[in-house]
Amino acid sequence: MQNIKAPRESDSPVTSSSSTTRNMNKKKYLEQFKFPFCDESSKYEIVAKIGQGTFGEVFKARVRNTNNKKFVAMKKVSMINANEGFPITALREIKLLQQLKHENVVNLIEICQTKATLRNKYRSSLYLVFEFCEHDLAGLLSNVNVQFSLGEIKKVMKQLINGLFYIHVNNILHRDLKPANVLVAKNELLKLADFGLARAFKVAKSGQANKYTNRVVTLWYRPPELLLGNRNYGPPVDMWSADCIMAEMWTRSPIMKGSTEQQQLVEISQLCGSCTPDVWPGVESLELYNKMALPKGHKRIIKERLQRYIKDPYGCDLLDKLLQLDPAKRLDADTALNHDFFWTDPMPCELANMLAQHSQGMFEYLIPSRRPEHLQHPHRVAAAQLKPTQLTQYSGYQDRVY
Ligand SMILES: Nc1ncnc2c1ncn2[C@@H]1O[C@H](COP(=O)(O)OP(=O)(O)OP(=O)(O)O)[C@@H](O)[C@H]1O
Ligand SMILES: [Mg+2]
C-alpha cells in the first residue's frame, strides 16, 4: 500500500506570519504532500498518444524501470474549467468504474497524479490509469485490411451486449456508446470504455418520472426518444447505440449520419419509419414531438436496406428488433443475447487469429477523422447547435451534474 507521508507541522502555511513565508511554506507543503492512495504518475513512462477525447488526452504507457512489459492507458483529467473544481465527468467515471468489475468493462487500475512543482504552477494533473487494450472498434472498422467473418462479428457483438447486460443489471447507463468507446484487446476481450457520461438509474415509480438530461450519446448513435426530449429513459438508449454499432460491423460506416438533431430524426425516420403513435404509443406526449419537424409517411425499410450488406437472416432479424423506435419494444440485453443470431452456425468464434495479423494498434485518434469535429461528442453537438448568443450562457454545461 502507498506510504502516506504527513506534511510536517512546520511546513504548514498556517503557522507562518508574513504572507511571503506563508506562500513559500504553502509551495513546500504542496511539493511534499503525498495524497493517500494516489501514486505519482512518474512511475509510468509515456510511450505514445492514442486518444484525444473531449475531456483529456489518452496515452499508452508502461511502468518505468521494471521488466514489466505490460502497458497501461493513462487518461489525463483535463482541468479546462479548473474554477469549477474537479470535473464531474471524471468523478463519475472513477466512481462508477470502481464499482464495475467485469471482463467486458475496462478495468480502472488506479488514479495517479503529477507532482505539484513550480513548473506546473503547483497544480498537479490527475491521470486515470486503465488496463491497456490494443485497439478500439472505430480504429478496426476504419481499416479496410481488417475483415471480420460472421462468427467474429457475433463474438464482438456478444461481448458488447454482455458488457451492457452487466452494467444494466447494476443499474448503470453508459450513455455514450460508439465504436471509439469500445476497446478490443489482443487477447480478444472486448471492453466497454469511457464512462464519462454514464450514470446510475432507477426505474421510475408511477407518477415520479426521472429527469435525466437528454443531451447524451453522440448524435449518430442517439436514439429517437432522446432526440424527442424524453428525460425519463433507461437501458434501451444503450441498446439503440449497440444496434447502430452492430450494423456498422457490416457497413463499416455509421448507418445514420445526421448533422443536426433534426436531421438525425430524418435519417432515423427514413430507415426505421416515421415516429407516429401507431408504432410508438405515447410518442405524442414527448416534449419535442410538436416542436420538431417530424418526417411523415416514411415506411420502415431496415431489412431491405441492410440486406445488401447483411446476408445472415438472423443478423437482420436481431438488428430489426433492436432498432425499434419505441424503446419499450426494443430488445433488452438479456433477450438479445438469447437471440438465434448468437446460437446458430457459424457460432461466435475467436478473434485471436484475425487480430494477430495486425501488429499496429488501431485507434480512432490515429485515423483521418471520420466526422466533423463538432460532432465527435454529444456536448459539442449540443453546444454547436446553440446560437452564438446562447453560447456564453451555455459554457460549462459539460461539467454539470445531470
Ligand atoms: N484502456 C484503454 N486502452 C486503449 N485505448 C484507450 C483506453 N482508454 C481509452 N483509449 C483510447 O482513447 C480514446 C479516448 O478515451 P475516452 O473515450 O475514454 O476519452 P474521452 O475524453 O471521454 O473521449 P470522447 O470525448 O471522444 O468520448 C478512446 O476512444 C480510445 O481510442
Ligand atoms: Mg470516448
Image (tube, grey):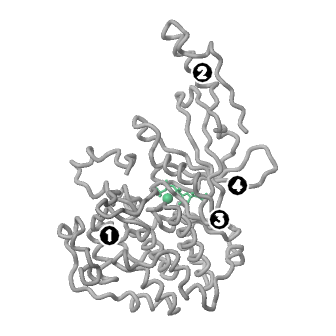
Q: Badge 4, how many Cα within 10 Å: few under 14, some, many 20+?
A: some
Separation of residues labelled 3 and 2 (CA atoms): 41 Å
Nearer the observer, 193 or 44? 193
Separation of residues labelled 1 and 4 (CA atoms): 40 Å
Q: Mark 2 or mark 4: which is in front?
A: 2
Separation of residues labelled 4 and 3 (CA atoms): 17 Å
In the rendered structure, the answer to whether residue 14 lies left or right of residue 233 reads right
Check contact, mark 1 vs mark 2: CB within 8 A: no
Q: Mark 1 or mark 2: which is in front?
A: 1
Q: Where is residue 128 in the image (x, y as percent from the top left)?
A: 59, 47
Which SS class for mark 4? strand
Q: Counting residues from the N terminus, which is met first, the one under dot 2 or under dot 4? A: 2
Residue type at numbered disc 2: Tyr
Q: Counting residues from the N terminus, which is met first, the one under dot 3 or under dot 1? A: 3
Q: Name the residue under label 4.
A: 71
In the rendered structure, the answer to whether residue 179 lies left or right of residue 398 reads right
Q: In which quarter of the image is residue 321?
A: bottom left
Nearer the observer, 228 or 142? 228
Q: Mark 1 points at which residue?
A: 225
Q: Mark 3 points at which residue?
A: 103
The quarter of the picture where the N terminus appears is top right
Mark drawn on residue 29 = 2
Relative vertical location of residue 269 with respect to residue 13 in this rendering, above or below = below
Residue type at numbered disc 1: Glu
Relative vertical location of residue 218 with respect to residue 82 in this rendering, above or below = below
Q: Is mark 3 within 8 Å of ligand 1?
A: no
